[in-house]
Image (cartoon, rainbow, N blue to C red):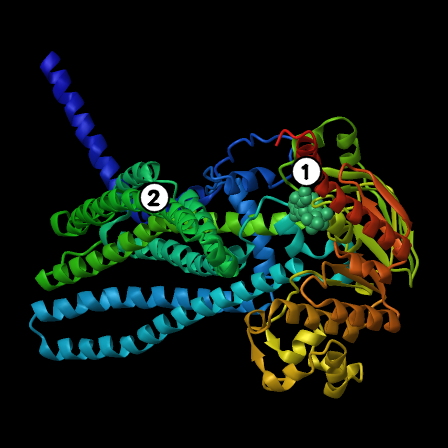
Amino acid sequence: MSSSASTLRKQQLTQLLAQFSKGYARNRPAIQRVLNAAFAIYAVGATYRGLSARPSAPKKDKGKGKGKGDAKDGESGKPPRVAVDALFYRRLSNILKIVIPGLTSKEALLLVMHSSLLVFRTVLSLYVANLDGVIVASLVRARPKEFFFNILRWLLVAIPATWTNSWLNFIQSKLAIAYRTRLTNEVLKQYLGSEAEGPDGKVYYKLANLDDRIVNADQMITNDIQKFSAHLAAIYSNLAKPVLDVILYNYQLSQNVGAEGLLGLTILVQTTAAMLRYLTPPFGMYTAMSAQLSGSLRHTHSRLVEFAEEIAFMRGEETEKMLLEREYASVMKHENHVLNRRWWFGCIEEGVIKWLWGSFGLVLCAIPVFFKLPGIPTVDLGGRTEGFITNRRLLLSSSDAFGRIMYSYKDLSELAGYTARVSLLLDTMKDVRKGKFDKALVSSATTGENAEILKGRGEVIESEDIQFENVPIVTPNGDVLVKSLSFHVKPGQHLLIVGPNGCGKSSLFRILGGLWPVYGGVVRKPAASAFILIPQRPYLSLGTLRDQIIYPHSKADMEARKITDADLFNVLSAVQMDHIVEREGGWDAAKEWRDALSGGDKQKIAWARLFYHNPKYAILDEATSLVPQEMEGLMMQHATRLGITLLTVSHRPSLWQWHHLILQYNGTGGYVFTKLDAERRLALQEEKQALEAKLLEVPKMTERLAELRLLAEGRK
Ligand SMILES: Nc1ncnc2c1ncn2[C@@H]1O[C@H](COP(=O)(O)OP(=O)(O)OP(=O)(O)O)[C@@H](O)[C@H]1O
């Protein structure tokens, strides 16, 4: 009884299975369609999930401004927090708005061309995969005519294929250049924002002096932007094309071997891919760190070039070498570490992507050979070979495309690294333009009255005169040099500023020039264009001799002012430098003027520049320290004759006679502002010096007196 029941159950089961396979075979085309559609959705979804943001790590620096945390991490030697996360996509989308400003922009057009070519290339590849199978089949079937005809087709396909690849590379490079240009233009616009923008300008100065976040802006603007652009241009083809390829190749493959096999293969590939992704080292962080370290090394080298003379005289070679070696060693340590991680990751990657997935694929290609698939007719040896070759090629292309999606995660991480660097630059510039600075403060800045001063903001009002009313002088790191400074200078009244080193004499000029913020009180002053500064070591630009005198004007500006070379010659005569026109080879001679002129000559050229511009006010910061006294007198006289009001910092008493007012700092936060009676002051100075000289004699005289006393007493 029981055995007949089990036989019945078996029969029922067999019937059920037969019904199922009949039903499956009947509905297979529909099932295939569903599986294919599911695969396409899955491929896009998996790629999206793989590339989409993981939640950013929580910020430790709560309360600080946006971007500050990253910046601090980046520049303080700690690894910057860089990953393919929400923060990366936010940063990237901000930068994308700059590099692709609109749908009708050149960049958008290039992207459309690029995408069309990518699709075209995939279609060609599908055609070539089929052709490959057909060629081998004609070989196996020993049909020479068919074989040669197919070879001809192969050669004909090569024409658009090679053309497409060349075009793709060309357009990708064009895109990289276009991105770089957009980004560089935007950065330069903000970096060198003109003074017409008022307090928002002079970002290059503020980045270097008022903020600690960026130590090597030059490296970021040149190298990092270029690398970012190249990566961004490449990532599109590295991602878009493989995703398209995976879908199209797999669709074609599923037609040949059945969507079921493909489903199994996908499950296996995805499992190993997840493992691979888990093992991927943080390449984004490595890239950002690498850029930061090499920037720092370059910065140290550029300091050596800039201060070569000073270092040579100080015999500082050993110290500089040590500094350079230390920087280089940090770069190398990091690069070696990255290299090691790349090495072992490369082994695992190739093992999995090429070999393991390759074996899965071969099994898949064998399905139509070993199993009879419903809906696919039985074929001869040639047909089987054709199918195998085509499938294998499709599979190789598909696994190559999938591999590229995997590899592109690495590219994406690197792009995240460069995106972090470029964003740091853009964010810091934005903050600096808004007057938000991030600088290490001195300890006194956070206590008592000083902290109160730092919280405040003063008022700047445009006026003909220069008037400070209760204005504190505060350094960028929060050191309060003078708590409340008040003085008033009218046009024509030359002001002399004196005081011990580091008391804030030049800092006053930085406030006048709009470089440092005003923390309190009221500053009345003309626009920054009414000032010309002559420092002790004047700046000489790249360009011709003429450019040195008229800087920052161009020759066109000069001509627009109706000034000729003959006028410039007169300007040079005023500082007794007219001979250099002939000596240096004419007005259009261009050289490195920093090296071609002596220290005193540079100061005289800067004075000539002052006479050319003829501004309302001249700021002279030890501007005559290297010229003879009689020359100094001539230059002062000429400036006064032109109606330029002088604001002078100098330790030379010979300059006193040219000034009407004096602002004297005492070095401990106090000051005296008064009329300068040069004659009286000189007389007092002379008397003081005479007394000091006499005082120096006192010990000698005391000693001699003691000797004389002994002699007088007859003891010697
Ligand atoms: N960019 C800066 N960042 C931080 N501190 C600065 C900066 N520039 C100047 N200081 C500080 O401000 C203080 C005053 O400098 P300032 O150049 O005004 O001195 P000074 O009176 O002109 O001295 P000297 O006669 O030696 O030229 C100094 O302690 C200096 O360290």
Percent of width and height locating residue 713: 69, 29
Residue 681 image offset from top left, x and y in percent: 87, 52
The quarter of the displayed image where residue 67 is located: top right
Q: Is residue 561 above or below residue 686?
A: below
Q: Residue furthest front?
A: 714
Rendered-image quadrant of the N terminus: top left
Number of numbered discs present?
2
Label 1 sits on residue: 704
Respond yes or no on whether mark 2 lies under 8 Å from ligand 1: no
Residue at point 63%, 50% (across, down) = 207
- Report whether residue 30 is seen: no
Q: Pick whichever of labels 1 and 2 is earlier in the sequence.
A: 2
Against 668, is 385 above or below?
below
Quick check: 520 left or right of 598? right
The quarter of the picture where the C terminus appears is top right
Q: Residue at x 72, y 64 (%)?
A: 624
Looking at the rendered structure, the secondary structure element under dot 2 is: helix
- In the picture, measured across the screen, residue 498 lies left or right of residue 545, that is right
| C-alpha span from label 1 to label 2 | 69 Å
Q: Residue 170, percent across and down?
A: 41, 72
Q: Are marks 1 and 2 in contact (CB under 8 Å)?
A: no
Residue at far top of view: 1
Task: Say which quarter of the image contains residue 189.
Answer: bottom right
Q: At label 1, which amino acid type do we have?
A: Arg
In the image: residue 498, left or right of residue 237: right
Label 1 near ligand 1 (CB < 8 Å): no
Residue 333 has which mark?
Answer: 2
